[in-house]
Each structure stands twice: as structure tokens, then as C-alpha cells.
Amino acid sequence: MDASLLLVIFVIFVALVFDFINGFHDAANAIATVVATRVLSPFVAVLWSAAFNVLAVFVIGTGVAKMVGKGLIDLHFVTVPVILAGLLGAITWNLLTWWWKIPSSSSHTLIGGYAGAAMANAALTEGIGKTFAALIPSGWILTLAFIFIAPITGLLLAYVMMILTSWLFHRVEGPKAERWFRRAQLVSSAFMSLSHGGNDAQKTAGIITGVLVSAGALRSFEVPHWVLWSAYLSMGLCTLAGGWRIVKTMSRRITHLRPQGGFCAETAAALSILLATQLKLPISTTHVITGAITGVGVVAEADNNTPVGARNRPGIHNKWAGSNSLAG
């Protein structure tokens, strides 16, 4: 078998390894809240999440894949070895942050490794002064902006949803309201998993397509169906490996969640991720859900600091908020 073909196959394999690591590294994104509120056991939660990660292939397009593959880096500076170097850098950092229990961004790790390798190639082939010629500025402006915009959007949406749900349920008895939110969390966690798979799996699909274009196997940057399915199935199957070290950080150390907060955080994060996906932007699902959980915690902390006698008034301070408080 030709050596160049073997290299292409190996790089595709490495890309799917990255997808595998992303699966157990980012499993916490979609299941941290539903595990924290004890709506689902960890084992059932990862099965639930994995299924909806894969189902996203039917409802999400390929805009993010094309942005990652050709919208950020000038393909003139992309070769198969460049993509391999970027993937190895991303995998190394993902493994380190997983070991250190840090909920870091696999997405930013991937595009950062890809960009760094392409910049190094530009410097080696055309001189150090051409290092940044490998980057496409128009693609990076919104991508970098959404590093800040996406988690803030998740935070604000979760904040508003906490207030709205408190108003809507301020006359409902605590146990009844909690039961409703526990059921609703099944929907919101599925929604979160769907949006997570739809954004994250596309990044790997974009990288694999970039390998095929660089190797001359594709004439234009169009994501083949087999590439999409490989990325989505890898993401779903590897979510089953679990990201329990990060789940503990996400679900326990940021804020203590109850079903109301879990529902609001998951729904807000899913909406924020889908917004970015519609804009064809690769974002950090980790940062978005962290922002959403923080928004929930802000409202809950305000409730905890309210005098007990004031909690019966309509609004965020209501007669069952204490039993569903989200802050520790």
C-alpha cells in the first residue's frame, strides 16, 4: 500500500481518536446537570446523552465542519502532516486537562492546534514573516468573539429562565413543582446532548474532510456522508466511556443543582449552542454550560440571601424556591 495513503488513513484514525477523547472529556457538558439533580443515574445519563449526540446527524447541517476545515485556515498551508501535528497537540492537551479535572474546551484546543501547525508550516515554507498568512481573519473574528459571547449568552438565558420559571410556578407546591422539573429535565438534557453532538462532532468531520482535500482524495471541500457518520458515531460511542472526573467538577463544585436549575441550565446552554451552530461557529460547549450553571447559581444565591418571610412574594423568591435552591 502506498505510504501517502497509509498516512492519510492514520491521520483519519487519529482524528477519530480525538473524537473519542472529546466524547469522554465532554460527556460532562451534557450530563452534569441531570446527574447533579439525580434525575438520572450516571450510567443511564451517558446512554441518554450518547443516543442524542448521534441523532444530531439527522437535524444539523455541515456549516461548522466547513468553518473548521476551511474557514479558519488557508488550505494552501494545510498538508496531511500539518493536520496530524494539530491533532496530536489537541489530544495531548485534552488528556492533560481531563487528568487535572479541568472542564476545558476541546473545540478551542482543536482549532488552536490546527492553527498552530498551519502557522508553523507557513513560517517554514515562506519565512517567519508569513507566519500569520495561514490564518483567515474573517473566520477568526466571530470565532474569537464567541469565546466570550457564547458563555455569557448561556449565563443570561439561564438567569432569565430561572426568574421566569419561578414566576410561573410561584403558586405551585414545592414537591409538585420539583416533580414537574424532574420530568422536564429529561427533555432539556436530550436537547443539550443534541446540540452538543451537532456542534462538536462536526469539528472532527471538518478536520477529516481537510485531510481528504489535502491528500487530493476530494476535489472540493464537501463533507462526505461516511465522514459525518464516523464522527457522530465516534462521539456517541465514546460518550459512553464517561467523563466522570469532570462531571464531579461541573455538577458539584460550581453550584449545587436542583431540578429547576438543571432544566434552566440545560435549556439555556442548548439554545446558546444551537445559535452558534446556525452561525456556523465552533464554540466551547464546556464554557457555555458552565456559564449557564453560573447564571442559575446567581439567581439561587440571591434567593438564599432573601429573608425567609420575603420568599412568598411572586418572582424569584417564592414559597418553593428554598427547596429547589441551586446554590450550596
Image: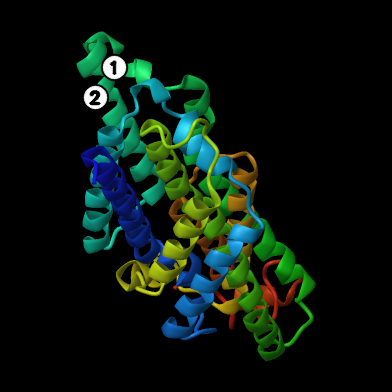
313 left or right of 295?
Answer: right
What secondary structure is marked by label 1?
A: helix
Task: Please name the residue that numbered disc 2 is placed on.
Answer: 120
Q: Amino acid at mark 2?
A: Ala
Visible residue check, residue 141: yes
Name the residue rendered at 51%, 62% in the picture. 293
- Image quarter (top left, top right, bottom left or bottom right) of the C terminus: bottom left
Colour mode of the rendering? rainbow
Name the residue rendered at 78%, 71% in the picture. 168
169 up-or-down from 131: above or below: below
| Closer to us: 173 or 9 | 9
Q: Amino acid at mark 1?
A: Thr
In the rendered image, residue 159, in percent from the top left (x then y), is placed at 62, 57
Visible residue check, residue 300: no
Name the residue rendered at 47%, 28% in the picture. 140
The CA distance from mark 1 to mark 2 is: 7 Å
What secondary structure is marked by label 2?
A: helix
Occupied quadrant, residue 280: top right
146 left or right of 7?
Answer: right
Task: Please name the residue that numbered disc 1 is placed on.
Answer: 131
User: Could you tell me if the residues under marks 1 and 2 are in contact, i.e. CB atoms within 8 Å?
Assistant: yes
Name the residue rendered at 56%, 55% in the picture. 198
164 up-or-down from 105: above or below: below
In the rendered image, residue 134, in percent from the top left (x then y), is placed at 36, 21
In the rendered image, residue 236, in percent from the top left (x then y), is placed at 46, 67
19 left or right of 200?
Answer: left
In the rendered image, residue 289, in percent from the top left (x then y), is placed at 50, 58
The number of numbered badges drawn on the structure is 2
316 up-or-down from 160: above or below: below
210 left or right of 167?
Answer: left
What numbered label is drawn on residue 244?
Answer: none
